[in-house]
Image: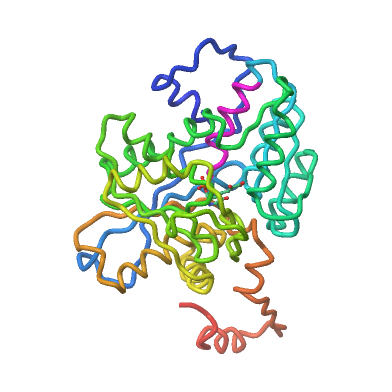
């Protein structure tokens, strides 16, 4: 499968690129599917979900990582380094492995979902922990590597990351045949909202209204201030000082959008509702759906609009949280049809 560099490099100025340095795992071309809503067709917006968990490492980060690691290789770098709440780490580790580069990931201690840590180990990256949130990890890493010119920082301060992530906006336009009216996505370090905004503009289109979605305990954009000790069940967006704050602000103000925060409880409820329609996302990625439902309850979703939710990461990544949302229920079975009859008429079995 052709990755996003081959599909979209004609839109970008990458400069000279030796084809042998192109590092891809076949990222992009993720599905855009209808999302069921509590309102009837026509009574509110038609809602679509972009399934970014279908990327090679299970999150949208792969779109930027293919480009960042390719350019690092082209520039003769020897290592890719990042600070991460988990998904950037998993993606950097995978693409570095693919490229034959060393990878180092720095994570906030104790707060990264187990599936993401497992990916980092599987791909063979060095895993370092710091005390405190993501923001401290990034600050320390930036300072520590400033003088090492052969090491590449692959956080979203790396411009190739954001450029690669623009590709998701191009795909939404291809899949929908137009720009949606509303665009809802989780905001942590604010790189992805920046990328979508730039992506629509690069195509010469008027961008949609951006609704940046955050958790109440890490609502840096909603509250318009840095959060010293961010805390949320949605660990992917447990970030207090977004690096791309000013770009995210521009994306929202220029499109008459807004930032909205929802509670952890609302996020987990949204995760469960999505799962009950066959869409399994991690908590951070359920945030846009929680925000959509909140705006609907407030009567703030004008009818006859199209909305796109970005489901940024796969639900399997955060199995610890998912175990709490979806507790194990095992029932012994005697092989009888009667037991199946009973089970399928009982309330526990959906729908
Ligand atoms: C599932 O991996 O910051 O606003 O270090 O993993 O572009 O930061 C992850 C962020 C949304 C927020 N959804 O995107 C990291 C990291 C998921 C994420 C976001 C992240 P940005």
Side of 342 relative to 168 (left or right): right
Percent of width and height locating residue 94: 69, 37
Residue at 46% x, 38% y is 29
Q: Which residues are magenta?
A: 60-72
Secondary structure predominantly adopted by residues drawn in magenta = helix
Percent of width and height locating residue 43: 21, 68
Relative height, residue 154 to residue 50 (above, below) = above
Q: Is residue 300 covered in magenta?
A: no
Side of 175 relative to 71 (left or right): left
Residue at 49% x, 70% y is 263
Model colouring: rainbow
Relative height, residue 30 to residue 303 (above, below) = above
Percent of width and height locating residue 71: 59, 21
Q: Is residue 70 covered in magenta?
A: yes
Residue 90 seen: no
Residue at 68% x, 76% y is 328
Res 21 → quadrant:
top right
Percent of width and height locating residue 109: 75, 55
Res 217 → quadrant:
bottom right
Residue 148 seen: yes
Q: Nearer the viewer, residue 119 or 258?
A: 258
């Amino acid at each position: 499968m052709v990755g996003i560099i081959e599909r979209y490099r004609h839109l970008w100025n990458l400069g000279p690129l030796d084809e042998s340095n192109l590092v891809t795992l076949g990222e992009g071309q993720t599905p855009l599917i209808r999302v069921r809503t509590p309102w009837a067709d026509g009574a509110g917006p038609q809602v679509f979900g972009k399934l970014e968990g279908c990327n090679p490492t299970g999150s949208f980060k792969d779109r930027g990582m293919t480009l960042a690691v390719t350019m690092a290789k082209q520039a003769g770098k020897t290592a890719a380094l990042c600070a991460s709440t988990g998904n950037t780490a998993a993606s950097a580790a995978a693409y570095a492995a693919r490229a034959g580069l060393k990878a180092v990931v720095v994570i906030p201690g104790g707060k990264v979902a187990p599936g993401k840590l497992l990916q980092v180990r599987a791909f063979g990256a060095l895993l370092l922990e710091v005390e405190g949130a993501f923001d401290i990890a990034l600050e320390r890493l930036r300072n520590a590597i400033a003088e090492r010119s052969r090491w590449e920082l692959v956080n979203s301060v790396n411009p190739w990351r954001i450029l690669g992530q623009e590709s998701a906006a191009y795909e939404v336009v291809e899949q929908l045949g137009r720009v949606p009216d509303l665009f809802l996505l989780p905001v942590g370090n604010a790189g992805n909202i920046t990328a979508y905004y730039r992506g629509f503009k690069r195509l010469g289109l008027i961008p949609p209204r951006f609704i940046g979605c955050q958790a109440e305990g890490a609502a840096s954009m909603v509250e318009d201030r840095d959060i010293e000790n961010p805390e949320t069940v949605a660990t992917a967006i447990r970030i207090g000082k977004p690096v791309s704050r000013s770009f995210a602000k521009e994306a929202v103000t220029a499109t008459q959008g807004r930032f909205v925060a929802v509670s952890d409880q609302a996020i987990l409820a949204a995760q469960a509702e999505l799962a009950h329609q066959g869409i399994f996302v991690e908590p951070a990625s359920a945030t846009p759906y929680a925000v959509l439902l909140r705006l609907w309850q407030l009567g703030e979703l004008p009818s006859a609009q199209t909305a796109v939710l970005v489901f940024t990461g796969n639900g399997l990544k955060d199995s610890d949280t998912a175990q709490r949302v979806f507790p194990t229920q095992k029932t012994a079975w005697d092989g009888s049809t009667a037991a199946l009859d009973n089970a399928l008429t009982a309330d526990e079995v959906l729908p």
